[in-house]
């Protein structure tokens, strides 16, 4: 079977949480398994390719037209097309074209109908979903989700028979040599700081109160984006001590910073895939995870992992204290073993890739 992944924009190779980067990782695994796979990118221009977009077909949109892409689809009518993302009129029009021509396609939503969006939508957005997005999803032969709340919502909206709930995989970049922890109890946060600044403000406010008791604690931020300036202004305005911004870090340099942390905090973003939690687990670092996250169900048996409601400052404080005390007993070693099993079993690409065949059995 020939599978063609269709993405919006070009791939940012270094930032692992970007959707197109995630697609690249999936394609790598599928190709290693011997699958016939290609990637087609829809971009505003062909020039300026970077990252893996150089190894993909790039289709330029002029005024939203997709004529060249449609012709390529018609030249490969037996392929199964795999859309990645949502809330795009380009995908809506492309789905209508595929339905009209009898072309099979599936969609991975990448958390675009996540908890934050589903329950925070205004009337106009809800109408748009009901009239436009829902119709696109119904045209697909399969709809793939990685978030249980999202999966339940879409199952109720379009029927359960075409829904597929399946993890994304994760692979450590290299075997890790453990480094000494930072001398101060260190809480870490990793994100592209664009649309999740509100969640981070609540967490930093919780850290401020936590630090009033655990006075040498530190809060490290890995990431950049337009929201980082606002974060740092808030920290300065409120005179919050112990906060450090590392900016964007990649690969082994990022791993070395994570390994020095004691715990990672994770609040769900619009694209709710908890890769930072898995990166931290690969470095034997537990996490405090917002209960709205899609990864909560996999972490319940690891004692150093804690959970908090995303908007509850008090729950974040309580969770930070619980992890602090976890390091003084045997619970940490139990959690390390749990993290190892999580990566080797639940999120192991080699075990997941055969299950991905279900997506394309249409």
Image (tube, rainbow, N blue to C red):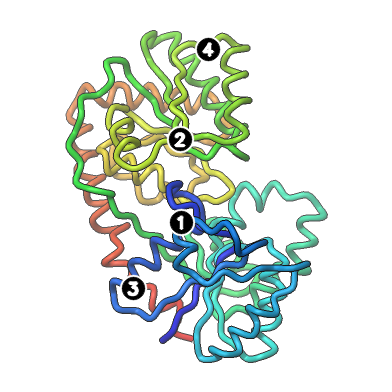
Q: Which quarter of the figure has residue 280?
A: top left
Task: Provide residue 224's location: percent of width, then percent of height.
Answer: 53, 34
Asked which secondary structure carries label 4, the reply is loop
Q: Residue at x 22, y 21 (%)?
A: 328
299 vs 50, nearest the viewer: 50
Which residue is labeled 4 in the image? 240
- Do tag 2 and tag 4 residues touch (Cβ < 8 Å)? no
User: Relative to residue 245, is residue 11 depicted above or below?
Assistant: below
Q: Residue at x 45, y 80 (%)?
A: 3
Marks 2 and 3 sit apart, C-alpha to C-alpha, by: 29 Å
Marks 2 and 1 sit apart, C-alpha to C-alpha, by: 17 Å
Circle nearer the N terminus (1, 3): 3
Circle nearer the N terminus (2, 1): 1
Which residue is labeled 1 in the image? 51
Horizontal side of residue 1 vs 209, given as left or right: left
Asked which secondary structure carries label 3, the reply is helix
Which residue is labeled 2 in the image? 248
Circle nearer the N terminus (3, 4): 3
Task: Provide residue 332's location: percent of width, then percent of height.
Answer: 22, 32
Horizontal side of residue 192 vs 340, given as left or right: right
- Do tag 2 and tag 3 residues touch (Cβ < 8 Å)? no
Q: Residue 31 shows which numbered tag?
A: 3
Identify the residue at the far right of this view: 124
Marks 2 and 4 sit apart, C-alpha to C-alpha, by: 22 Å
Marks 1 and 3 sit apart, C-alpha to C-alpha, by: 18 Å
Marks 3 and 4 sit apart, C-alpha to C-alpha, by: 48 Å
């Amino acid at each position: 079977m020939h599978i063609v992944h269709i993405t919006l924009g070009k791939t940012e190779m270094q930032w692992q949480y970007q959707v197109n980067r995630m697609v690249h990782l999936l394609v790598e695994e599928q190709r290693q398994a011997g699958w016939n796979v290609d990637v087609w990118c829809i971009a505003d221009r062909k020039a300026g390719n970077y990252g893996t977009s150089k190894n993909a077909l790039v289709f330029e949109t002029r005024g939203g037209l997709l004529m060249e892409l449609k012709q390529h689809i018609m030249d490969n009518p037996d392929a199964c097309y795999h859309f990645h993302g949502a809330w795009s009129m380009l995908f809506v029009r492309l789905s209508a074209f595929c339905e009209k021509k009898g072309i099979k396609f599936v969609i991975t939503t990448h958390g675009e109908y996540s908890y934050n969006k589903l329950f925070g939508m205004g009337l106009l957005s809800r109408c748009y979903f009901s009239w436009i997005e829902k119709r696109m999803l119904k045209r697909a032969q399969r709809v793939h989700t990685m978030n249980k709340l999202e999966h339940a919502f879409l199952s109720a909206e379009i029927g359960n028979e075409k829904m597929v709930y399946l993890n994304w995989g994760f692979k450590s970049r290299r075997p890790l040599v453990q480094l000494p922890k930072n001398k101060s109890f260190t809480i870490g946060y990793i994100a592209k700081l664009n649309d999740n600044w509100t969640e981070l403000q609540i967490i930093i406010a919780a850290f401020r109160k936590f630090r009033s008791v655990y006075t040498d604690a530190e809060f490290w931020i890995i990431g950049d984006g337009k929201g980082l300036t606002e974060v740092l202004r808030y920290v300065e305005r409120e005179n919050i001590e112990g906060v450090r911004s590392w900016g964007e870090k990649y690969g082994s340099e990022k791993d070395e910073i994570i390994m020095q942390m004691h715990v990672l905090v994770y609040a769900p973003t619009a694209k709710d895939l908890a890769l930072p939690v898995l990166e931290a687990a690969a470095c034997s670092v537990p996490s405090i995870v917002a209960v709205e996250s899609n990864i909560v169900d996999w972490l319940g048996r690891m004692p150093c992992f804690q959970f908090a409601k995303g908007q509850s400052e008090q729950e974040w404080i309580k969770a930070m204290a619980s992890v602090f005390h976890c390091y003084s007993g045997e619970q940490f070693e139990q959690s390390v073993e749990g993290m190892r099993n999580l990566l080797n079993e639940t999120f192991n690409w080699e075990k997941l890739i055969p299950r991905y065949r279900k997506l394309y059995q249409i």
